[in-house]
Amino acid sequence: MKSNTLVRSIALAAALAITVPLFAKPVAKALAVPHAVKFGNVDVKAGDYRAMIDDNHLTLLNGKKVIAESAGRWEERSQKSPYTVIVSNEAGRVTELRFEGKAQVFVLSE
């Protein structure tokens, strides 16, 4: 009887572990763009935007208007970022987004 209860508990825990990421809320953060950059193939002018990250998909919004979209992934860093910042390469292409107080960064694929 005990082993049957243990098997059910393990099965329930495994099912919850699989379904919890499906219900995770998207990350929504205000994002100040200090100078023109590229998100993927889209040129983005300096200004204030909103970044919506749903799992591995970034949507950059200006109000309700979609400005740019890109795929990416979350990566863990050794230190928390002291502020929210856009990291771009020498060509002005955004490579990652860092968020204040978080050790996770969103690295863009493109």
Image (spheres, grey):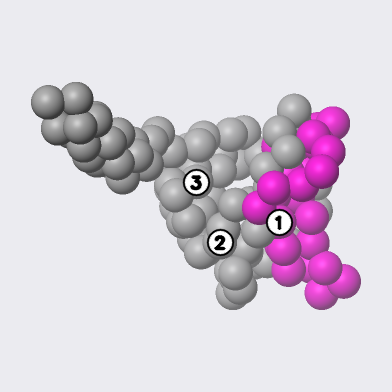
N-terminal of the pair, mark 3 or mark 1, is 3
| Residue hosting label 1 | 96
Magenta part of the protein: which range?
A: 75-99
Left or right: 1 in relation to 78: left
| Residue hosting label 3 | 53
Residue drawn at (60%, 41%) of the image: 49
Contact, mark 2 vs mark 1 (Cβ under 8 Å): yes
Q: What residue type is labelled 1?
A: Glu
Residue 87 can be seen, yes or no = yes
N-terminal of the pair, mark 2 or mark 1, is 2
Residue drawn at (56%, 39%) of the image: 50
User: Residue 24's image quarter?
Assistant: top left
Residue 67, relative to residue 102: is it above or below?
below
Q: Give the quadrant of the C terminus.
A: bottom right
Say which element carries label 2.
strand
Contact, mark 2 vs mark 3 (Cβ under 8 Å): yes
Q: Does the magenta stretch include residue 76?
A: yes
The disc label shown at residue 82, or none: none
Residue 23 can be seen, yes or no = no
Q: Is residue 31 magenta?
A: no
| Residue hosting label 2 | 72
Residue 42, relative to residue 16: is it above or below?
below
Residue 15 lies, in percent from the top left, at 24, 40
Q: How far apart are marks 2 and 3 (CA)?
A: 9 Å
**Neighbour tally class for label 1: few under 14, some 14-19, many 20 plus, Cα within 10 Å:** many
